[in-house]
Amino acid sequence: MTNSALGRAEVAAELGRLDEARRIIGEALIAQPDDPVLLERMADIAYRLDQTDAALRYASAAIAADPARIDAYLTAALAYDAYTMRAEAQRHARMATRLAPDHVGALLVLARVIANAATSDKPRAEARDALERATQLAPTHPSTHAHAAETYRRLHDSDAARRHVEAGLAEDPVHTELLQTRARLDFENVATRDMAIATLRGLLGSNPGNVGAQRLLAEIMWRALIGLAAWGWFFAAAVVALSMWIPAGGLRVLTPALFVGVLGAWFGVFRKLSRHLPQGYLRKRLLRRPEALLALVIGLVSSFVVEIGAAVVRSEWSAEGVRGGYIVVLVGMMGAALAHLLLFAAWVGRRDGESDRRAGEEFALLSVIIVIGGGLLLVGMLAALRHWARQPAAFGVFVAIVGMVVVTLLLEILLVQALEYRWRMFDAYAGGVLFVAALLALAIWWGWQQTATQTFHSDERAPVPTAPKSPPPIPTFHFTPSLPPPPAG
């Protein structure tokens, strides 16, 4: 019965029907709940279905039933790695390589979990050594090249990744995982993104149920839409930074030009997506996610709100008017942040076969790193030079904007962790997370406080006093009394 169930489950899995494969193995486990082979296979299927808790549970049960089950150690290693429990992941992968030093799969998994945790050259060299050993043991096996290419991509070695992609496709030109990795490499290069979409459309045309291609195509769409909200952030930050140094006359030219550029970005993104994605793809996904439609409306309106604030700032009617303009810009900034968060939630929050929470987490982490690095540099420069600025009080507005951006991205990372129930990671780094959160809260509060209390420059002038007009002269009358006539004679 075990062999029959395994065979039918394997056929279902190859056809992409993982839920059916899980049902077949589950029915077999009812009759044989301690069978290590069935437990091992169920762990693998659960992992492929993104059911990480179940994968870890079944893998641990398989190891307990038979401590020599190499594939169970490998699935456990990948599950621990998904939970960012890097030490446990590497321990299980190394146990598999000790049991079978020349096991190609064990070498590939060991390289993967080391690469995901590598922060220095030594572990990266160990991961490369494991990859080289695996490809030497199976030089003509396309799946080996596919795993090696993906790991090299995570090691940020695009050239090595492409070499393995081409070597694998030379053996199997229609290998799904190799084509997916090629598409991702093309997507990561701005000049070849059109080629990535063409590859994915070809994969889905031949196999509409290909989960990897579905997720990557969805990632391309959602990252493009989330970028629209980020344009709102850029617009608000640019308006504030420019207003610190450029007079009102220059702002009357530059800020409307920036606003037109933001509207052009919206038009360009939707035009490009509608041209490159399958017909009806974008409309269907947006209609199924009302929160995404709401986010797009909020994001577009927020850009108009920022432009209204910019118009008030550049008018410089009065100091209080300039302050009000900056407050309007901050309100538009908060709207863009809400749009960004809603679009991210629409991407990672749905279990429809296209939500890729790992890719979403990587996207948010990379965004945080870029924003913190670039934001701190800009804040430091403006802080050092603000005493020579035309509008030094606008520095507080800029600090508040950077703080709100980082808080939004951290909330998105927290959202992914909550959806995956990865509270272990927060337990390990709770002190650092709370410290960063406190600093950001302080920065945002300080920025708002500066906006509310500092004196802003304006072109308002007090009326010049003029001398009052002299009143008309009062007429004077002279009375001359008449004298009596002299006496006669």
Image: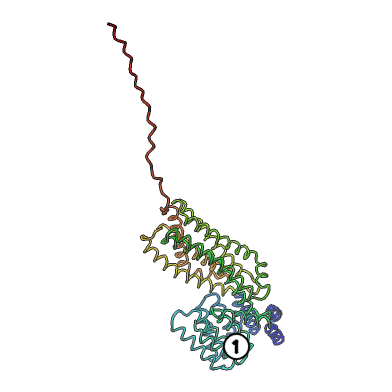
Q: How was the colour assigned to the protein in this rendering?
A: rainbow
* Viewer-nearest residue: 104 or 77: 104
Q: Position of residue 333 (x, y in %)?
A: 52, 61
Give the residue displayed 43% in from the left and 57% down from the top: 446
Q: Position of residue 479 (x, y in %)?
A: 34, 19
Q: Position of residue 309 (x, y in %)?
A: 51, 57
Relative to residue 119, is residue 385 depicted above or below? above
Residue density around tag 1, few if under 14, some if 14–19, many if 20 or more, within 10 Å: some
Give the residue displayed 54% in from the left and 80% down from the top: 191
Image quarter of the N terminus: bottom right
Q: Tell me, yes or no, if residue 477 can be seen here.
A: yes
Judged from this view, the residue extending furthest toward the front is 489
Relative to residue 311, is residue 479 depicted above or below? above
Relative to residue 470, is residue 282 depicted above or below? below
* Viewer-nearest residue: 442 or 256: 256
Give the residue displayed 64% in from the left and 77% down from the top: 214
Q: Tell me, yes or no, if residue 399 can be seen here.
A: no
Relative to residue 239, is residue 122 depicted above or below? below
Q: Secondary structure at mark 1?
A: helix
Q: Amino acid at mark 1?
A: Ser
Residue linked to disc 1: 143
Image quarter of the C terminus: top left
Which quadrant holds residue 141?
bottom right
Which quadrant holds residue 34?
bottom right
